[in-house]
Amino acid sequence: MATHPEEKIDEMLKTRRIQAANPDLAQRIILKAQMTPQAQVFSLGRWIKQTFAELHLPNPAYVLAATLMMGFVLGLNVPSDTAPENADAVQALIFLDPDEGLL
Amino acid sequence: MPVAWPEKDDEELLSLIQDGSQQAFSVLVQRHTERFYRLAYRYTQNREAAEDVVQDAFVKLWEDPGKWQADRNNKFTTWFYRVVVNLCLDWQKRKKPIELGDQELTMADDRDSPDIAILHAEKQKILEKEIAALPERQRTALNLCFDEGLSNHEAAEVMGLKLKALQSLVMRAKTTLKERLKNYL
């Protein structure tokens, strides 16, 4: 039991009585919120998130797109082994050039 | 593996509430209703009023969850304590000074004998009356510091004060109470 007035005040403050809330208070709040529409506030972060969510593609689509991209990149970088379409004509000209030179 | 709802922290739940998740809101309400009710009751000394304050605070949060911003507020509870305190102060401004009725007399400890119980209840009634008469900031400091689960540091954060300033407010409040309640100590 506290004897000093300071301690007695502390004890009184610590033992302030509180009438218990209705046990269904939390449920009431939840129900009330369910009937209340949520305000749509603009937030840049949320907008970006939503936009990305809208553009979300399933994983196979990303795999296909990535494969195509790789194909294009490789295709453009590897030198072509195939001869040009007029390769025969070029060869003929090379062959004929020296003779024509003599004339 | 996805984290179960009750294991999500407040900030995660708030982020989901901002995306319209009612389930996240339910978890948050069930987790914190009791503690905020206790604080509201300390101000209002009336069950219905305290319940209304807590309900208002949560419904406002649901209506406009964007008010809580993770980058500005470190902790949801610190911010929400402030919301509840402000609603309680608004409520008090609208109401006339607290008049404690006979119902408070029945709130004494059941283990006490009837005489002691009545004496305790009477002391409580006078204590509440004197706390209600304290300046607003002193009253808030007292209510927050003697609320279970809230450290002095957190209470100072809720009030936007340095720890020393909060301790000074509590000290002044206790000195006033000691003076006014000297016949009951």
Image (cartoon, rainbow, N blue to C red):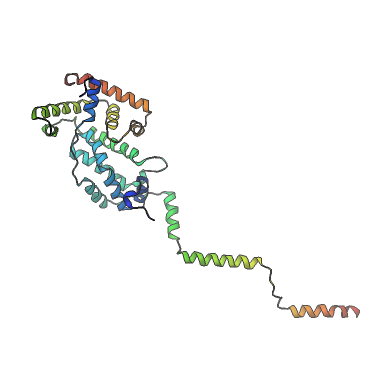
The residue positioned 24% from the left and 49% from the top of the image is A32
Measured as percent of width and height from the top left, residue B182 is found at: 19, 19
Residue B80: name its quadrant. top left
For this orientation, the residue located farthest to the left is B114
B102 with respect to B171 (left or right): left
Left/right of residue A96 with respect to residue B97 in the rendered view:
right
Give above or below for B32 relative to A64: above
Residue B28: % across, % down: 30, 47
Q: Check the image and name the residue furthest to the front.
A: A1
Q: Residue B166 versus residue B64: which sits nearer the camera? A: B166
A56 is higher (above) or lower (below) than B110? below
Give the residue at the far right of this rendering.
A102
Closer to the camera, A33 or B11? B11
Location of the C terminus of chain B by quadrant is top left
Task: Tell me which residue sits at (26%, 39%) in the image.
Answer: B35
Quadrant containing the N terminus of chain B in the rendered view: bottom left
Is residue B132 visible to the viewer in this orientation of the structure? Answer: no
Q: Could you tell me residue B164's position as x and y percent?
A: 37, 25
Residue A102 to residue B58: above or below: below
